[in-house]
């Protein structure tokens, strides 16, 4: 994201998305999801366009806002721009130096990085175009443990605490608990595997250093039927959607049931 785009993403009530294929509009999903996981998030973004390379840093911090007593949302941000003559990243001329130093001071005080050099080092593995999001001060549950479980599976991130027991006869309980229909409720790897209906060739998801294998839920069904769904509003037909229904291949041993609804290629329900 360039400096303008990162401000629209991290601010509230702004959007420049015009494409009908875009998912989301005002960045509410980004803000609510990151703040649900932790109190603070810092974003590093590089952009290369029109022969101008920029680096931007933004901080959305509940800790900062509450401890400083702000009655409005303040998002400290700084921008750097590549000097093509010296080859160095320098302070962007978008704002004066006093404004830049004020924002930099807040970033250094309330982020995990205590020096400007440490901040800029975070761009080393991003390249000329990309974004890195770091969430910290993760929330704790009532029992004093971090809500997310990083220890049970070194290749996964799970919801901490006891996993909801599956109602099944003892002989079938294990196959039910291991089925993706139940694992996706507490396993990020399982959820990410079905998040997209189709994965573009140039797109990959990596979780804790391991690629996430895409899974097409239709292939888990037997006795498939294809039904055209025609939603109507006020007696007028809105669209036609081809749905696939069937039984899980493990049925009746696995008793999970329901619908998975995709919109613009992404799971929404």
Image (cartoon, rainbow, N blue to C red):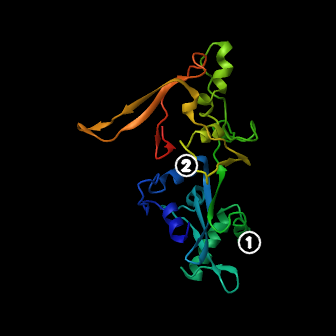
On screen, residue 16 versus residue 67, left or right, reads left
Q: Which mark is residue 6?
A: none
Camera-side residue: 267 or 118? 267
Question: Could you say which disc has been placed on residue 33 in the image?
Answer: 2
| Between 214 and 8, the one nearer to me in the picture | 214
For label 1, the SS is helix
SS state under label 2: helix
Are circles 2 and 1 on residues that touch, CB within 8 Å? Answer: no
Vertical side of 153 occupied by 264: above or below: below
Residue shown at 67% from the left, 26% from the top: 178
Mark 2 or 1, nearer chain start: 2
Q: CA distance from mark 2 to mark 1?
A: 29 Å
* Quadrant housing residue 79: bottom right
For residue 117, the mark is 1
Compare residues 28 and 96 and report the one nearer the observer.
Answer: 28
Query: At x 71% / y 72%, what residue is drawn?
Result: 116
């Amino acid at each position: 994201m360039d400096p303008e785009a990162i401000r629209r993403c991290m601010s509230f009530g702004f959007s420049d998305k015009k494409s009908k294929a875009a998912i989301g509009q005002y960045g509410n999903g980004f803000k609510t999801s990151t703040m649900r996981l932790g109190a603070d998030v810092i974003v590093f973004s590089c952009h290369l366009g029109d022969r101008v390379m920029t680096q931007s840093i933004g901080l959305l911090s509940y800790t900062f806002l509450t401890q400083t007593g702000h009655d409005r949302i303040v998002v400290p941000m700084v921008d750097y721009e590549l000097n093509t003559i010296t080859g160095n990243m320098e302070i962007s001329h978008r704002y004066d130096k006093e404004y830049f130093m004020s924002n930099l001071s807040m970033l250094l005080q309330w982020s995990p990085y205590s020096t400007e050099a440490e901040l800029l080092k975070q761009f080393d593995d991003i390249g000329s175009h990309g974004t890195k999001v770091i969430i910290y001060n993760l929330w704790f549950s009532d029992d004093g443990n971090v809500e997310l479980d990083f220890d049970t599976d070194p290749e996964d991130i799970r919801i901490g605490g006891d996993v909801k027991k599956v109602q099944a006869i003892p002989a079938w309980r294990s196959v039910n608990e291991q089925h993706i229909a139940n694992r996706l409720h507490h396993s990020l790897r399982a959820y990410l595997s079905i998040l997209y209906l189709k994965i573009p060739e140039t797109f990959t998801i990596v979780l804790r250093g391991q690629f996430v294998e895409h899974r097409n839920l239709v292939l888990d069904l037997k006795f498939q039927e294809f039904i055209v769904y025609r939603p109507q509003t006020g007696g007028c037909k809105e669209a036609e959607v081809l749905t696939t229904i069937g039984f899980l291949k493990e049925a009746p041993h696995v008793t999970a049931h329901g619908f998975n609804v995709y919109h613009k290629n992404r799971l929404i329900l």
